[in-house]
Image: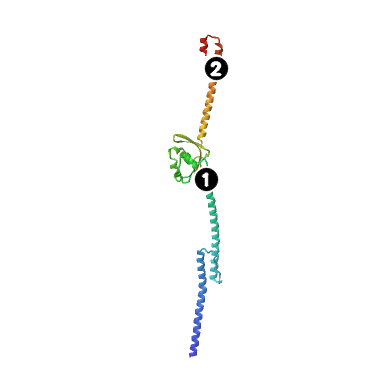
Amino acid sequence: QVVYLSFFLMVTLLILVSATWMGVYIAKRIMRPVHLLSDGARALEAGQLDHRIEPETADEFGSLVEAFNSMAGGLAVSQRKLERSQADLRRKNVEVEGRRRYIETILERIATGVVSIDADGTVGTVNRAASRLLGLSEAAVGRPASEVFDRIDLRPMGALLKSLPAAHDPSAREVALERDGKAIYLAVAATTLQRAGAGEGGGGAVMVFDDVTPLIRAQRVATWRDVARRLAHEIRNPLTPIQLCAERLRRHFSTAPPQARALVE
């Protein structure tokens, strides 16, 4: 009985140890891929998109590991595409900013006044020449154009803006403004801007104007000179025969008595 019990106990312990070892082994085979996947997910979360897991089995866990690697590869490709897109966007932003500064520099240096109106009806740009010609300050930028051009001396410009939707002639118009008791003549060309994806207009407006006051004055002076020349010509025409008649009278009365010659002279 002792030998039998000893043998039975040894077999029982062997079975128990084998079952425990088998359970631990199977648990490790199940939990190791799960831990690897968990560590890989944390690595991806940390930005390590090149992290990969080596498949150890060909079962369902192996398929899950392959799917994880495929997902990580897709994320890496998407990340590279996103980085290239961001680099292109930064480069385009730099180009746009440089072009904007270039245009602003040109607008500030030219003698032509430029005023732009945004799509919402606010003043977007007023260059230095426009500020000088219209008497506007930097505070006008961002304000509604209806308020800026509601000033008494700028109402002709406001009327021109209001007539833009119905006007299709881009030719310049002459606008007279009163400033400090003096008349200022501007050649104004206003046009609506087209917004991308919209029809006619929709993107605001822009006014470009030049000071033609010296030209108008020169034209008036030239006109008056021409009038004076015509008047002088019309006056000179009758004066010539009068002068000839007077000379004939002088010759005719050259032998007359002194009193008659004095009267003729």
Residue at horizontal 54%, vertical 25%?
230
Q: Amino acid at mark 1?
A: Thr
Number of the label disc, if any, that sits on residue 105: 1
Which one is earlier in the sequence, the residue at label 1 or at label 2?
1
Q: Residue at x 55, y 62 (%)?
A: 76
Q: Residue furthest front?
A: 258
Q: Are marks 1 and 2 in contact (CB under 8 Å)?
A: no
Q: For this rendering, which residue is in front, 265 or 20?
A: 265
Res. 137 image quadrant: top left
| Camera sees residue 200 | no
- Please state the total of marks drawn on the protein image: 2
Above or below, 195 relative to 16: above
Q: Position of residue 140 (x, y in %)?
A: 45, 44
Q: Residue 236 location in percent, x, y?
A: 54, 21
Q: Which mark is residue 158?
A: none
Q: CA distance from mark 1 to mark 2?
A: 67 Å
- Which residue in the structure is indicated by mark 2? 243
Q: Is 9 situated above or below 173?
A: below
Q: Secondary structure at mark 2?
A: helix
In terms of depth relative to the viewer, which is nearer, 137 or 29?
137
Estimate how packed mark 1 is, as few (under 14), some (14 to 19) or many (20 or more) residues with alpha carbons within 10 Å.
few
| In front of the other: 201 or 227 | 227
Question: Label 1's element?
Answer: helix
x 53%, y 27%: residue: 225
Q: Residues within 10 Å of mark 2 (few under 14, many from 20)?
A: few
